[in-house]
Image: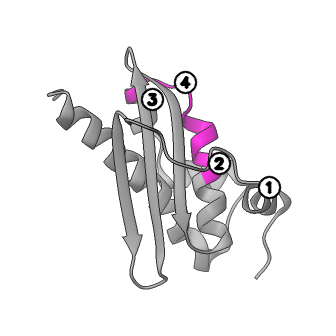
Amino acid sequence: MMYNEKVMDHFQNPRNVGEIDSPSGVGEVGNMRCGDIMKIYIKVEDNIIKDIKFLTFGCGAAIASSSVLTEMVKNKTIDEALAITNNDVAEELGGLPAAKLHCSNLAADALHNAIKDYKEKNNIP
């Protein structure tokens, strides 16, 4: 299975790894079939995602997807972030092997769960 340079860069040098103290929202997803687990933390100020971090236990594609997602989302509004799809994540990486596309799905799903958590905590419909 071959990964492109951008996927390898985000896997070997992941951006925004870690946790946020007192996050505005947290989203977690897992895929039991492959064993990947992703947790996304967001810090929201004035409807803008000012900070985003992740912890991912999984394959190189899962780590790269988490990393690139954090770069895509930082300083976007909640609505802009919600519009990001799993296809957007895979495209931003320059493509993933078909067997690894589910990894980009996890990243977008974890983000959407973090935003849902933020909205629930703040009574935002």
Residue 115 point in image, percent of width and height = 33, 39
Residue type at mark 4 is Asn
Query: Which residue is found at the position 39% from the left and 82% from the top?
Result: 32
Q: Which is more N-terminal, label 3 or label 2?
A: 2
Give the residue at mark 4: 75
The magenta-colored residue range is: 67-78
Q: Which is more N-terminal, label 1 or label 2?
A: 1
Indicate which disc residue 80 carries.
3
Element at label 1:
helix
Indicate which disc residue 90 carries.
none
Q: Which is more N-terminal, label 4 or label 3?
A: 4
Residue 32, compared with residue 17, is above or below; it is: below
Residue 110 point in image, percent of width and height = 40, 54
Q: Are marks 2 and 1 in contact (CB under 8 Å)?
A: yes
Residue type at mark 1 is Lys
Mark 3 or 4, closer to the camera: 4
Give the residue at mark 1: 6
Q: Which is more N-terminal, label 3 or label 1?
A: 1
Residue 71 makes an appearance in the image: yes
